[in-house]
Every structure is written in C-alpha cells, then in structure tokens.
Image (spheres, rainbow, N blue to C red):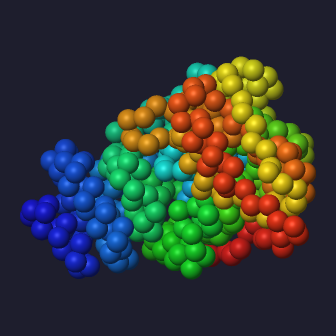
Amino acid sequence: MRTVDLIQRKRNGEELSPEEITWLVESYSRGEIPDYQMSAFLMAVYFQAMTDHEVGAMVESIIASGERLDLSSVPGPKVDKHSTGGVGDKTSLIAAPLAAAAGVKVPMISGRALGHTGGTLDKLESIPGFRTNLSIDEFKDVLSRTGYAVVGQSDNITPADGKLYALRDATGTVESTALIAASIMSKKLAMGLDALVLDVKVGAGAFMKRQIDARRLAQLMTTIARRADLRAQALITDMNQPLGYAIGNALEIMEVSQTLQGAGPDDLAIISIELAARMIFLGKITATLEEARELAQNKLIDGSGFRKLKETIAAQGGNPQVLDRFELLPNATGAMEITSPRGGYVSAIDAEEIGLASAMIGAGRDTKEDTIDPAVGVILEVKVGQKIDAGGVLCRLYFTKEDRLQEAAERVEDAFRISATAPEPRELILEVVS
C-alpha cells in the first residue's frame, strides 16, 4: 500500500477497508509514515468523515498498538467517565472521587490540552509531585488501594492514540467526530471496563458546536461500546459558557477542592453529581438512578469524595495538602482585570474565546511541543444571567509572562455580551443517549 493513495481516496470521500485503516495506524505507530502525511490523512477525514466501519477499524487498530489492560484482579465494578472536552471542565476530578467513595473502581486514562480545551493530565500535573506516568502494576495498585487512579497514554496502552492525539491538536483536526470517537473509545475498550459514562459537550466552547453533531458523536460512541458489550450512557451537556469560574490548570484544581467541600459553583456541582450518579448506577452499586444521585450527593456532603481525591493524589506521588493550602500550587505573578464597558446583564460568555485566551498566556498549547504553564489562566467574576455595573469586573487574567497578554485580554473582553435584559435560563444537561 502507498500512503498517498489512501490519502487521496479519503480526500475524495471513499471508504477505506479495515485492512487499509489498520495498515495506516500500524505504519504511523512504527514511524514509517511521517507526520506530514498522517496530517494530510487526518485533514481528509476532517472534511470527508468516516463510516462506522472505518471508525471501528481505527478503534481496533489503536487498541492493537498496545496492550489490553486486565483489571480482573481488582475487585469491584470498573467504571470510567470521559468528557469530549470543554473550557473549565474539571468534572472528572469531582465525579470520579465521588463515585469511588461510593464503591466504584475508576480506572481513568486521560488526555492533555487540545486546542482551546484543557486536559485532565495537565491539571493534575500542576500538583507538585503528581505522577501520571505510572506503570501498569503501579496503576493497578493505586486503583486497588484508593479506588481511583489516573494515567495518560503510554507505550503500553494505546500508544498510537498518543501520537495521533498530539498531531490532531497541532493540525486543526481536533473537532472531527470520527477522530474524537476513535480516540476516546480505543482507550476505554483497552481498559477492561464494565461501564462507561460519557460527557459530550456542545456549544461555543466545545468541539461540537451543534446539538445534532453532539448527538451523532454520542450515538457513535455508545454504539461502539454496545458492540463491545460495554454498558454506556452519554450526557449531552451545555458548553456555551465556561463550566465553573476557573479556567487554567492549578486554578481549576483550586475550584475542584472548593466543589468537593461543598463550596463550588452550582453548574459544576450539578453536572459532576449527575455524572457520578450515572457511574454509580451503571456500576450496579444502586438499583435505581435516583438512589445513585442521593448516594453521590451524600458523598459530597460528608466529605468522603474530597478525602478520596486526597488519597489518590498521595498514592500517585502528589502533595494532598494542596487541596487545603492553595499557596502550595503554582501561582501566577501578575493579574489583569477585565471590566465591563457598560451596565446590564451578562447575556453570553463565549467559552471558546475564553479558552483560546487562556491558552495564549500559557495554559494550553499551540503545538504539541509547547510546555504548559500550570499557574496561569482566567477566573470569571460573573456568569451568564448575572447583573453587572459599568466598570464592574468581568474576569481576571492570571499570568507569569506578558507575551500575548494584551491580545488575550482583547479576546476575553470580546467574549462577554452585555444586554439590557436578562437572558432565558439554559439547561445544563440537554439529552441522554444510551
């Protein structure tokens, strides 16, 4: 086979065979196909999409690039949660500890920042000492002891996805439904899970801008799960404004701590508890979803979810005291206020613009080689629907370097819409797909 032939055929909208998809993934994994050719293939997929059969073949070939994780030695139901990516989306760090405190084992393979969205690994690595590069034996040990463990892609588990994930971020192909589904589901099916809860974001700050596309992605992933005999549900949730108030790695860890102690933003707490409830229910800890919601809420109120996250941080080499003493986290050296030019109601906050601005000052990546600055980001002072006076503070940018700061500030200012009347409330959870 010739790579250029497969690129041209996909560019022309043709369906590739499972053997051709497998050859592409295997050859790229071995370094036999250069980044520039795989980039061209990814762009062709972005414009021409993939059939379900092509996505299925890509999932299987990505899994085959590494090992399937055998978690049979770990007692209890194994349930993971995954988000398609959003701005200020730190629900994994809240829902997972709550579910683990309820008796679910949560083995989580997470990703890094992609485009304007943050990555769970980057957030956790802002905690001094926290290790995400655990060996398989270490991963199983943490999972057995604490009930919740987090790692990234490795040479052992879906290494092909690790290479493709970074390349998508650098080539503007992140938003492809097929590539998102293949990336997420290959990691999940390689893990020996009993069930999976998916949070499919839709709106300005999500990769899926339209609900019809989010529904298509949710249906594609739950279909892949069902064919693999994996219990799965997907929530389609709103990402038109950032989730919570904090955007940026260490800043989001602070907000996670506040939320697990019952003092976090309502929107973040509501979605996190619902995701945890679905994990508990699909893990068959409770007989009904309503019982699962009550259990998740109780684990938040009694502080056991907060203690569970501390256990996992300590087990993976981090300092759990950061959840109580925020000065132990990386802290920015400068702050800039963005004020409202007029009074009124906040009618919209463009989450994508906020995410891009945060990335500009170091919280994200422009290329796969870029280094994250864990200290920087944006803290909102208002959310959609709130009233603000002229000159009132909309948000603050926290920075350590002034490179691109002014450009980021302009983006943030443009992200806010102020109206004379309050907007209609918008639902956080739009659909459930199973």
Q: Nearer the viewer, residue 213 or 351?
A: 351
Percent across and percent down for residue 70 are 45, 48
Q: Nearer the viewer, residue 84 or 210?
A: 210
- Determine whether, in the image, residue 279 is placed left or right of residue 42: right
Q: Residue at x 61, y 49 (%)?
A: 411
Q: Residue at x 17, y 70 (%)?
A: 8
- Determine whether, in the image, residue 356 is placed left or right of residue 279: left
The image quarter in which residue 260 lies: top right
Q: Is residue 318 above or below residue 110?
A: above
Percent across and percent down for residue 310 are 73, 31
The image quarter in which residue 272 lies: bottom right
Percent across and percent down for residue 413 are 69, 49
Residue 147 in view of the camera: no
Percent across and percent down for residue 354 are 64, 50
Residue 397 in view of the camera: yes
- Determine whether, in the image, residue 249 is placed left or right of residue 68: right
Q: How many marks?
A: 0
The image quarter in which residue 424 lies: bottom right
Quick one: quadrant of the N terminus? bottom left
Q: Residue at x 39, y 56 (%)?
A: 172
Q: Is residue 82 above or below residue 399?
A: below
Q: Residue at x 61, y 64 (%)?
A: 204
Quick one: quadrant of the C terminus? bottom right
